[in-house]
Image (cartoon, rainbow, N blue to C red):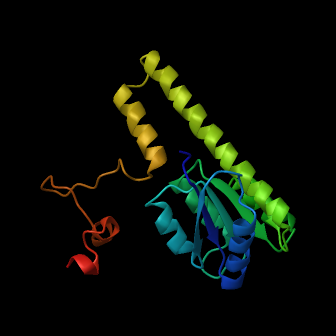
């Protein structure tokens, strides 16, 4: 069974998000490969979500009130470096392009109004590039392990972290116990209102 491709869409205009979702629904990015779409009108909420689950590809608008697209993609890159990043922009300004490439390391800039075929090709390319990066990192870790440069435990931790960002990081309190936030409890389902 093939793993779902997780696609994050970020735009402060709900009608743009609806149009992007419709394009994906009508023309799945990779034939025979299931996908899940998450939409956000708030870049800050999208960044929070990226701390909790793996995202394969993000498509982010450039002009938004909370954060611009370049800064949003830069922060997402810090959380999940292997994530495919696509900037959706209504402008062809040179400075925007330079910032997108140099600061956020975007793989593609899609100009509004987009053509569905261009957008889907960009998502497909980003998903494939991410898959190859992860595969290369895994192979490199295998070689490092064989050469004694990396323990098997560290290689496994890196593999797990690439699949579930943040899972290997633990916050300890002064008394040695593990700190668990209210958000962590709610995300497990154990703290949901139905459980109380």
Decide: is 67 above or below 70: below
Left or right placement of residue 32 versus residue 144 in this view? right
Decide: is 2 above or below 147: below
- Residue at the image position 52 percent from the left and 32 percent from the top: 138
- Residue at the image position 87 percent from the left and 68 percent from the top: 92
Q: Where is residue 173 in the image (x, y as percent from the top left)?
A: 19, 58
On-image quarter of the C terminus: bottom left
- Comparing 56 with 169, the one in front is 56
- Comparing 7 with 142, the one in front is 7
Q: Where is residue 61 in the image (x, y as percent from the top left)?
A: 71, 72
Left or right placement of residue 112 versus residue 159 in this view? right
- Comparing 147 with 114, the one in front is 114
Decide: is 133 above or below 172: above
Q: How many marks?
A: 0
- Residue at the image position 71 percent from the left and 60 percent from the top: 28
Question: Taking the image as drawn, is residue 62 in sight?
Answer: no
Question: Taking the image as drawn, is residue 146 in sight?
Answer: yes
Left or right placement of residue 152 versus residue 21 in this view? left
């Amino acid at each position: 069974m093939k793993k779902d491709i997780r696609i994050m869409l970020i735009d402060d205009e709900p009608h743009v998000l609806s149009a992007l979702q419709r394009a994906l629904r009508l023309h799945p990015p990779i034939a025979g490969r299931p996908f899940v779409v998450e939409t956000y009108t708030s870049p800050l909420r999208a960044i929070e979500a990226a701390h909790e689950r793996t995202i394969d590809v993000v498509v982010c608008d450039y002009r938004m009130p909370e954060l611009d697209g370049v800064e949003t993609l830069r922060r997402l890159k810090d959380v999940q470096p292997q994530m495919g990043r696509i900037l959706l922009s209504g402008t062809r300004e040179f400075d925007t392009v330079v910032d997108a490439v140099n600061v956020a390391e975007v793989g593609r800039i899609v100009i509004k109004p987009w053509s569905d075929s261009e957008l889907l090709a960009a998502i497909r390319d980003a998903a494939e590039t991410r898959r190859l990066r992860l595969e290369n990192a895994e192979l490199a870790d295998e070689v490092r392990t064989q050469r004694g440069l990396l323990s098997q435990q560290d290689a496994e931790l890196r593999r797990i972290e690439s699949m579930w960002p943040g899972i290997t990081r633990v916050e300890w309190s002064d008394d040695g116990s593990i700190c668990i936030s209210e958000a962590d409890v709610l995300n497990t389902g154990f703290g949901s209102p139905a459980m109380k």
